[in-house]
Amino acid sequence: MRAAVTALELSHFRSHKRARLALDGRPVAIHGPNGAGKTNLIEAVSLLSPGRGMRRAGAEEIARRPERLGWKVWAEIEAEGAPHEIETRAEAGQSRSVQIDGKTVPQVALARVLRVLWLVPSMDRLWIEAAEGRRRFLDRAVLSFDPGHAESVLDYEKAMRERNRLLKDGVRDAHWYGALEGRMAQAGAAIASARRAAIERLMAAQDETETAFPTADLALAYPDDTPEEAEALRAGFAAMRARDMAAGRTLIGPHRADLDALWRAKGVAARDASTGEQKALLISLILANARALAAQGGAPPVLLLDEVAAHLDTRRRAALYDEICALGLQAFMTGTEPGLFDALDDRAQRIEVTETAGVSQIRNET
């Protein structure tokens, strides 16, 4: 199976007033000076998946300045043997909309068409910062295996927002809480089950392959005693109402989960590893995700690796490129110097991005 973006068009997207890329499915090496618009290109690709993209930007933040006319991303993709067209856009002052093959769809539908994973420099501190970032990282992996995970997360978060509103308003009538907690419990159990299944797949994919990147033992953890079965979770929400009301928010549930990682060979927790080791663990998990998808017969994900080459030594950089090519992945990679991608030779499509008078310019080199 193959998954690839074969054409990409941008209109008034960040620094790109107009841009079009014709892509052939090979890895894409994008180089150019800082600030030229390299990351903007791969951010556009990240919006071919559900959510706010790799920068978690609101629709109004993306529109090119000074025009602020709204923006559009259009792409042709090939996924599991079928071609599709995706268009996502936001007019000035409006929220983002999505079309697949000419039909307007909710964002979550994108997960059933194309799987997109990314590593960006802001994730270099993933293991030592708040749990929220690790949950997002895990849920992106879960979504690649189970597109229905997006609906479960949305159902849970919507019900939890309504419950939190009741808590803040001091509502004590149990009937108001019962239905919401039932919805949260059903969705929460599905979320926990999907996360554990994804962790098992990631670890199995690491165990079955020799790689230049470290193997991690992964575990799902909670700061409180959160049950994962639906009925137990429902009972837990009911029992916590008084504490939750005092806090003004829901204190147990899958929204409190964390991802723990241990560098297996060294027996060192990821948070205690060096910066380079933490980056290597992240790359290892991304590659394991791709291998696991390939092993189950699905299309591999499209990878977005922003400035990843600059943080790897020559040996690991070559190893990363070799694994990407061996897995048949389309990976979009950015770097300031073309030499960072020398080990790819002709296995990659190369694009140079420059900036003139505040407008990004694109040149296809191969």
Image: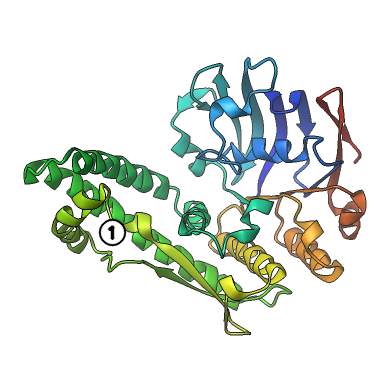
Residue in the image at 36% along x and 58% along y: 256
Left or right of 339? Residue 35 is left
The percent coordinates of residue 166 (x first, y second) are 19, 40
The percent coordinates of residue 201 (x first, y second) are 50, 68
Residue 120 seen: no
Left or right of 132? Residue 279 is right
**Front position in the image: 42 or 349:** 42
Vertical comparison of 308 with 93: above or below = below
Residue in the image at 57% along x and 47% along y: 115
Per the image, label 1 sits on a secondary structure element best described as loop
Quadrant location of the C terminus in the rendered image: top right
Q: Amino acid at mark 1?
A: Ile
Q: Quadrant of residue 191?
A: bottom left
The percent coordinates of residue 230 (x first, y second) are 22, 59
Left or right of 176? Residue 216 is right
**Which scheme is used to colour this image of the protein?**
rainbow
Residue in the image at 63% along x and 84% along y: 265
Q: Quadrant of residue 344?
A: bottom right
The percent coordinates of residue 118 (x first, y second) are 63, 51
Q: Which residue is mark 1?
A: 252
Vertical comparison of 210 with 29: above or below = below
